[in-house]
Image: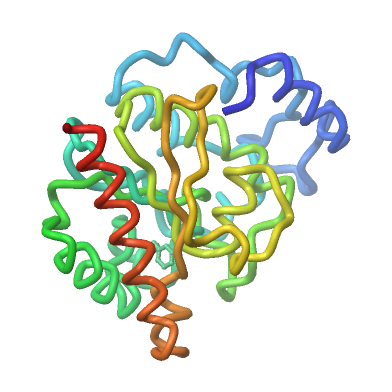
Amino acid sequence: MLAEAERRAYLEALEVDVWTLRGSAADEKPITADDDSVQDSEIVSWSELREKVSSCTLCSLHRTRTQTVFGVGSESADWMIIGEAPGAEEDRRGEPFVGRAGKLLDEMLRAVGLARDSVFIVNLLKCRPPNNRDPTVDEAALCRAYLDRQIALLSPKLILVVGRIAAQHLLETDAPLGRLRGRKHYLNDGKLPVVVTYHPAYLLRSPTQKRKAWQDLCLARQIMSELAA
Ligand code: URA
């Protein structure tokens, strides 16, 4: 996780220090690197964070979303699952991973003995990018503070990241997924293990890769058993 100062420097490097949304809608305000509406380290409760996310207008995705997709699951979960961004079905229902990829994710979790409601499932982005395009660097950077706060509030024992985009962003690397999966990574100064695997939408298109995804899930389960020992 980036420290607050690093995040601000990151936003400045992205030249979003003074970023005015196009158009003249009254609800759109300039965003500055000093704007603490998203950086706010004082957000201490889930309800406060949910409220912040649901009214977020930090990037242009708020104009096209039906609703924000905060995340779902147990607020005392040991496992946190991080995906990329809501798709059409998720945008409509306000819940992550409810489409075909979501059904496969549920099966993957069940295969290692986890019910959907026993983990916490979130996305890197809380709003749907139009036409399911990839998140932009700016969108991901602006939304990252919400994800960081979710991680801090949940304090999971392990993070399972699905897909290249979420993995690269979370781990701040441009390494390909093939090099990120199959091994342990860490956040929080080595305290929080992270396992990367294929996105279930990719596995639907490339079912022969399910064997490797299974290996990744077994690795995650093994890490959890070691932590419990
Ligand atoms: N893909 C994702 O990464 N997240 C969702 O919520 C749905 C599909």
| Colour pattern | rainbow
User: Is 147 situated left or right of 58 in this image?
Assistant: left
Query: Residue, x 14% and y 56% (percent of image)?
Result: 114
Task: Give the answer, above or below, for where 85 lies relative to 41.
Answer: below
Q: Quadrant of the C terminus?
A: top left
View quadrant of ligand 1: bottom left
User: Is 115 situated left or right of 37 in this image?
Assistant: left
Q: Quadrant of the N terminus?
A: top right
Q: Nearer the viewer, residue 211 or 202?
A: 211
Task: Give the answer, above or below, for where 121 lies relative to 177.
Answer: above
Query: Residue, x 42% and y 15% (percent of image)?
Result: 43
User: Is 222 situated left or right of 188 in this image?
Assistant: left
Q: Nearer the viewer, residue 159 or 74?
A: 159
Task: Give the answer, above or below, for where 210 lies relative to 3.
Answer: below
Query: Percent position (x, y) of residue 145?
Result: 55, 30
Res. 171 image quadrant: top right
Query: Residue, x 38% and y 71% (percent of image)?
Result: 213
Query: Percent position (x, y) of residue 77?
Result: 20, 37
Query: Percent position (x, y) of residue 54?
Result: 40, 38
Query: Residue, x 47% and y 36% (percent of image)?
Result: 147
User: Is 60 situated left or right of 89 in this image?
Assistant: right
Query: Percent position (x, y) of residue 134?
Result: 64, 66
Total numbered labels placed on residues in the image: 0
- Name the outermost residue toward the top: 42
